[in-house]
Image: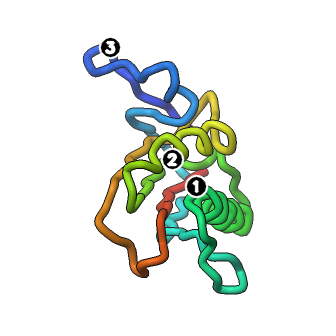
Amino acid sequence: MLKRLAPDTIRKVPQTFQKIYSHAVEITAAERLLFMAGQIGVAPDGKALESFDEQCHQAMANVEALLSDAGMTQADMLRVTYYLTNAEDLPSLGKIRNTRWGSDQPPAVTTLVVAALAAPELLVEIEVVAGI
């Protein structure tokens, strides 16, 4: 069973983030947990896509493929961590998340801007913990 936590004693989630962010997600009696390695914007042929938006959509597609392979869906995502190499891409990330992964029961989310990822052409990496 999943429960999203948002006590009145901490900052209320702004309206623009309510479909893509929870402060915390509690899970009780999980049957299975899936811990994903960070997924990047690299297509199945091994090529890194060029733009941030393309890489973000590809990384999300990779996450969705792993969820599907485990018999899970986006609704089963408990925690998502986004790593971006450019703070200027934060508005684009928000739009893509709202469009692709917006939900009435969003996961707990952390977004970090980092100096670099594993290869210089990589612009975004997405790490997920899911459970049912």
Residue located 44% across and 55% down the image = 82
From the top left corner, tell me how far across and down residue 97 is, in percent: 59, 43
- Whether 106 is drawn above or below 33: the answer is above
* Observer-nearest of 114 and 15: 114
Q: Quadrant of residue 53?
A: bottom right
- Which amino acid type corresponds to the residue marked 3 in the rendered image? Asp
Q: Secondary structure at mark 3?
A: loop
The residue that label 2 is drawn on is 78
Identify the residue at horizontal 44%, vertical 38% (top origin).
25
Horizontal side, residue 88 vs residue 42: left or right:
left
Res 63 label: none
Between marks 1 and 2 in the image, the one whose residue lies nearer the viewer: 2
Mark before the other along the chain sequence, 1 or 3:
3
Say which of 56 and 24 sits in front.
56
Indicate the amino acid at tag 1: Glu
Q: Name the residue that disc number 3 marks.
A: 8
Which quarter of the figure has residue 117?
bottom left
Assess disc 1: are there few (<14), some (14-19) or many (≥20) residues with their C-alpha within 10 Å of its C-alpha: few
* Residue 33 coordinates in the image, percent (x, y): 53, 59
Q: Is residue 124 visible?
A: yes
Q: In this rendered view, identify the residue nearer to me: 83 or 27.
A: 83
